[in-house]
Amino acid sequence: MSAIVSTPPAVRPSAPRAGTVPLLVGTALVVLIQLYASIPLRQPVAADLGPEGVTAALAAGYSFAYAVGFLIYGPLSDHFGRRRILVYGLAALTLATFAVSLAPSTGVLAVARAVQGLAAATFAPTALAYLGEALPPPRRARAIAAISIAFLTAGILGQVAATSLSALTGWRGTFLAGGLVLAVLTLAAFVVIREPEVDRPGQSLAGRYAGLVRFAVRPGSLLLAAGHLVVLGGFVGMYSLLGPHLAQAELSAGEIMLVRAAALPALFCSLLAGPLAVRLGVPRTALLGFTVAAAGLGGEAVLGGSLAGLVIASVVFVAGVALLVPAMIALWGAAAHPARGTGMAVNGFVLFLGAGLGSYAVELPGGLAGALGVLAGLYLVAGAAVYAARPRR
């Protein structure tokens, strides 16, 4: 059974404090915005610090450190507890974000952004593991769906917020504002979040990391990972292809941003994942998400010459991805049970590794239609791999 509908490990009576779930959802949005804010800030940073190495300083180091950080912090949260990793990680992220705003050169910026990415990686695996342990199944489904929406909307809202703030305060002011918001969230987490009272298997930290490696190389985990690479990889790939296509159609930057933002309402399809999982089961819900996403990409490939058709098809695609994210979280959590931190660590590493690979979709052959067709095929193959990895009764 999935993490959406299964019973958490040996939870003694203890409910999260009021406001815990909204706090985690809001924090997820702010933390993930730090990842996507770099996209519109490359030009202002280059104008300030010089163009040499700006892309690597802003994005590459952060993304790599962020993905690797998942593998570090999942077992740590299993070992030391969720609250400690969440609060200390947010405090470190706050300091690193302030440091980014003060960077005097691209070299210092690269180091600060890598530290920021490493600190940001504490949040997602720990928060998802916390929700899996602290909430009963119905509330857990809604909370995971809500935090999935936050993760996805950050990809669009992060670009909009960074563009707007940098126009008013400059790129340094953008990160300074982010640090101030994170400082408030860190204080709130310290006050509100309490450790779930869960009996976890006694194990050394080294044993937990060895368990992570064993879990990651299991055939079922490898099948899940093969499919999971496509989830955000195709999302980033589609939007990487869409921007140049719309620019060639002579849309302005503001109009392109509106086309991107048109799919925001579709992200709320994540809220359907819980009810669908109860009715269909989580593996079938994931398969449905992959199929809908592939259909949306196919529609974009066929309707690329029509702006209205392209927008509608992109909404269908994003709806499929929105279903996929919470379903895949549930599958990883169930596969790693009771070491949910380990499951969320591998989940996050593969998810954001795929997001990094997705930017190379612009290198695919066949223009927009050909590239989108390849991505659609990958979603279908990924759905088959994930469904094959489902647990047998």
Image: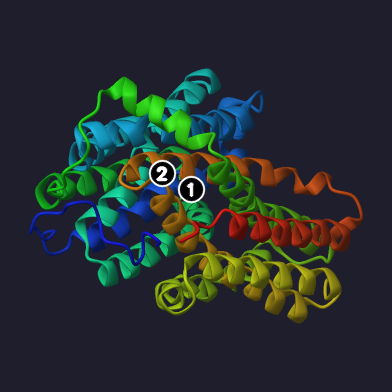
Which percent across, then down, holds residue 92?
A: 28, 31
User: Which label number is shown at residue 343?
Assistant: 2
Determine the secondary structure under disc 1. helix
Can residue 195 be seen by looking at this rendering?
yes
- Spot the residue most to the front: 393
Residue type (three-letter) at the residue carrying disc 1: Ser
Could you tell whether 24 is left or right of 287 in the image?
left
Can residue 41 be seen by looking at this rendering?
no
For the residues labelled 2 and 1, the Cα–Cα distance comes to 37 Å
- Could you tell me which residue is drawn at 62 percent across and 44 percent down? 354
- Spot the residue most to the right: 366
Determine the secondary structure under disc 2. helix
User: Which label number is shown at residue 166?
Assistant: 1
139 to 130, vertically: above or below: below
The residue lying toward the viewer, choosing from 167 and 184, is: 184
Mark 2 vs 1, N-terminal side: 1
- Could you tell me which residue is drawn at 58 percent across and 64 percent down? 321
Q: Residues within 10 Å of mark 1 (few under 14, many from 20)?
A: some
Which percent across, then down, holds residue 241?
A: 76, 56
Which percent across, then down, holds residue 16?
A: 13, 59
The residue lying toward the viewer, choosing from 257 and 265, is: 265
Residue type (three-letter) at the residue carrying disc 2: Gly
Q: How many marks?
A: 2
- Could you tell me which residue is drawn at 74 percent across and 67 percent down? 297
Which percent across, then down, holds residue 289?
A: 59, 68
Q: Which colour scheme is used?
A: rainbow
Could you tell whether 232 is left or right of 17 in the image?
right
